[in-house]
Amino acid sequence: MRVCVVGCGAVGSLFAANLAQLEDVEVWAYDAYREHVDAINEHGLRLSGAGDVLGRLHATAEAGELPACDFGIVATKAMHTDAAIAATAHAFADGCVATVQNGLGNEETLARHVERVIRGTTFPAGKLLAPGHVQWDVKGDTTLGPYDERTPLSEVERLADACTRGGMPAHAVPDARGPQWRKVIFNASTNPIGALTGLTHGRVCERPDLRALVSGLVNEGKAVAAAQGIELDADPEQLIDHAAQKHVAYDHKASMLQDVEARRQTEIDVLNGGIVRFGREHDVPTPLNGAIWALLKGVEQSWQQ
Amino acid sequence: MTNVCVAGAGTIGSLLAAHLGRVADVSVLVRRDEHADALLRDGLRVSGRADFTARVAAAVDPADLPDPELVIVACKGNDLASVAARLEGEFAGAMVMTIQNGLGAEEVVAAHGDWPLLSAVTFMIGTRHGDAHVEYILDTATWIGPYRGTTVDDARRVAGLINTSGLKAEAFEDLRPAQWSKLIFNATVNGVAALTGLPHDEHFAGEPLGALVHGLMDEGKAAAAGAGVELWEDPWEMNLLATQRGFKHSPSMLEDVRGERPTEVELINGALVRAAAGADVPVPLHDAVYALVKGKEASYS
């Protein structure tokens, strides 16, 4: 079996290096960052932290070099999905392509270029330390499911099995929208509040007015999910309160706050922007998510001044 | 009206004191000795749309200033309570005019003395370059109306004095419609600017931010209607006009957030949210902006 990770940043590297441990899997990685690609080809892809792994794989920045693959795992930032899959689609003409990205709409983008798409939600996280070297911060599960009837569940199971055997526990389910929407609602209701105020997760949650705003955002997200017949696999409200505890993630600075501080484009379009878009398609009003989306777009626009 | 005291010499107070100093005897009540010394030593310089230096009296204690016929309380909203407390027992017989953003400045001053009161809102824009130098940037008007123990004729007299001094002013029978137009405008524009980092520019009328600005204006208009106020100007039209003018003004709330100072969010957004609650009008977008700006203040205070 041949797997290509498209976008070999932190999360993509976790999949690539772990899958490369398997004798029956040949791993490729496609990434635009040439120093990273060269380092992987020369020294292998190293993970350290939650797990110490060295993966031997083929990396390339030239999509034309990719052979035909059974599976793709797309892990780019959401704003790069379209360009990345447009360049690599030829390698997946007979395969399936899974997204393990944040947010909503990535599956739709992939489906414009490839036939069989797998919806995925993943919780492991890390960061790129140096070319060829990624810090593995947190372990976690991945849920995979067919995007539509064109993707056989048996193929999803085959990919989930390989990930699990490689050290990235994954479940194949007929409908993976529950975990996806749970994660999206959690992120969309908390990350931008941190990004707009500069407060950590715990400090957002201990201010009653901001916590009420978070609940307003959660409720809109739940309504949009419900209108599509999606059953969340956990209540985002409970996860938010859990994370706000001192020993959990009270001091956590949302990744979107880190993006704003570094003036990097945020994932607001596939989080709150995605909830707004799906809400419009299903006639569910989402004024608060719309407001938060517009404010973050304004923040991004302010950097062009 | 030949003797005027301006209490608080930030941008607006400095613009008023300097201009009025050309047509009246002006004294300035300030908080710091160095500020008073600089004004006494150098006079108060205006640049930009005008270019002159006015002689003014200045002190940190009202007892050291001559008795005025008119007191203009021009400090920022956050300093209002302490300035009003310092005026207590002083300047009997003077008429007092508030000019702060938001709602409720008149009540704060009224609690500290029985002076006749005028309300004012101002659209003037300037930049303060130092204790004794202010730049006059945009010559938009100041609107004045009676509040307590005053009539529209008092408002006209003060407006006349301000007009003679080279600034622009207009008197109103009832200031509330204008005050609410500006309140809705400020709560929306200042709040969105403080949260996004954008000056008041074309983004406020474009997509996607314009839709939020429009939504905030609509909530504000509903709150005004609920409070029985018929607006003087449509705040959305004010927004369009200001963005089309092409002058990218950085609202004070944005400047305050940039400088990590306390903002006027309570007097502006808080006042709107509380007035809406009092009128039973839901304003969820304003609730969100109010909570977010307070959260931002908390992140650096």
Image: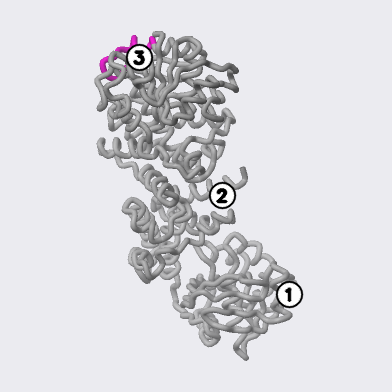
Disc 3 to disc 2, C-alpha distance:
52 Å
Residue that numbered label 2 is attached to: A300
Q: How is the image coloured?
A: one colour
- Magenta span includes B60: no
Task: Give how far across and how far down residue B244 sits, in percent.
Answer: 56, 30
Circle 3 residues within 10 Å: few <14, some 14–19, many ≥20: some
Disc 2 to disc 1, C-alpha distance:
32 Å
What segment carries the magenta color?
Answer: B146-157
Are the two marked residues, 3 and 1, in contact with CB atoms closer than 8 angstroms? Answer: no
Identified at 51% across, 79% down, the residue is A50
Give the image quarter of residue A28: bottom right
Q: Judge whether residue B123 can be spotted in this image.
A: no
Three-letter amino acid code at disc 2? Glu
Task: Give how far across and how far down residue A154 sits, in percent.
Answer: 51, 83
Are the two marked residues, 2 and 1, in contact with CB atoms closer than 8 angstroms? Answer: no
Residue that numbered label 3 is attached to: B67
Residue that numbered label 1 is attached to: A38
Task: Give how far across and how far down residue A209 sits, in percent.
Answer: 33, 50
Three-letter amino acid code at disc 3? Asp
In the image, is residue A97 above or below residue B197? Answer: below
Identified at 71% across, 73% down, the residue is A37
Foreground residue, B29 or A210?
Answer: B29
Disc 3 to disc 1, C-alpha distance:
81 Å
Circle 1 residues within 10 Å: few <14, some 14–19, many ≥20: some
